Amino acid sequence: MTDEATRLIALAREAARHAHAPYSNFGVGAAVLLTDGTVVTGANFENASYGLSLCAETVAIASASAQGRLSDVVAIGVIGGVIRDGAVTGSDVVRPCGRCRQVINEAAQIGGRDVRVHCAGAQGDAVNSYTLSQLLPDAFGPADLGIGVKG
Ligand code: THU
């Protein structure tokens, strides 16, 4: 595992402790690395009206955007697992859902870089690392609308 992956997975695991997931009982944490080394985290945020629920990656990317840092995203760590006795558990590797891949792509294209995506479980040493373009090839995004792409 790279230092970057180790750091982001550790912070994503911490963030997942604040998952609001009483309906699915599945906690997810995300940690977004910015160009200056700052990390912005998020956890899934469910709603009693189930379909309104927000994924951890979306919360974290939106939070980075709210801090004016959407174009500075270089990598994201994602973990998830079943909540048991208040703790997120399990060592199965969790990868971003399709909608979150599209959300990460917004940051990737606005920033003009292929975001690295590190995926792990809530526990254990297994980490799978990808680039966003591997997870979402030939993506539709801001570039198609002629918007804000650097470089
Ligand atoms: N979830 C995420 O936070 N990220 C993903 O990429 C996949 C799913 C959340 C949504 C819901 O709160 C719970 O996991 C179960 O689907």
Image (spheres, rainbow, N blue to C red):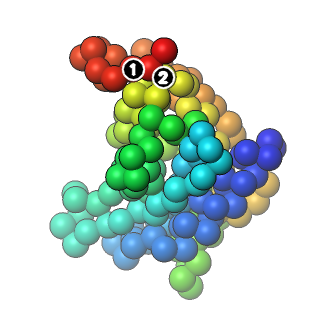
Question: Are dots 2 and 1 in contact, CB under 8 Å?
Answer: yes
Q: x%, y% of residue 56?
A: 44, 56
Q: Is mark 1 within 8 Å of ligand 1?
A: no
Q: In the shown orientation, is residue 52 left or right of residue 3?
A: left
Q: Amino acid at mark 1?
A: Val
Q: Is residue 141 left or right of residue 3?
A: left
Q: Position of residue 38 (x, y in %)?
A: 60, 52
Horizontal and vertical percent position of residue 29? 53, 60
Residue type of the residue flagged with mark 2: Gly
Q: Residue at x 51, y 38 (%)?
A: 72
Mark 2 residue element: loop
Query: Quick check: 45 above or below 57?
Result: below
46 relative position to 35: left or right: left
State the image quarter where residue 143 is shown: top left
Residue, x 44% and y 20% (percent of image)? Answer: 150
Farthest residue toward the bottom?
85
Residue bearing the label numbered 1: 149
Write down the residue under mark 2: 112
Examine the rendered structure and indicate whether residue 21 appears above or below residue 5. Answer: below
CA gap between label 2 and label 1 equals 6 Å
In the image, residue 44 sits, relative to residue 114, either above or below, namely below
Q: Does residue 92 appear anywhere in the picture?
A: no
Q: Which mark is residue 130?
A: none
Front position in the image: 149 or 90: 149
Image position of 56 with respect to 2: above or below? below
Q: Nearer the viewer, residue 49 or 13?
A: 13
Q: Residue at x 80, y 46 (%)?
A: 3
Quarter occupied by residue 106: top left
Whether residue 129 appears in this view of the structure is: yes
Quadrant into which the N terminus falls: top right
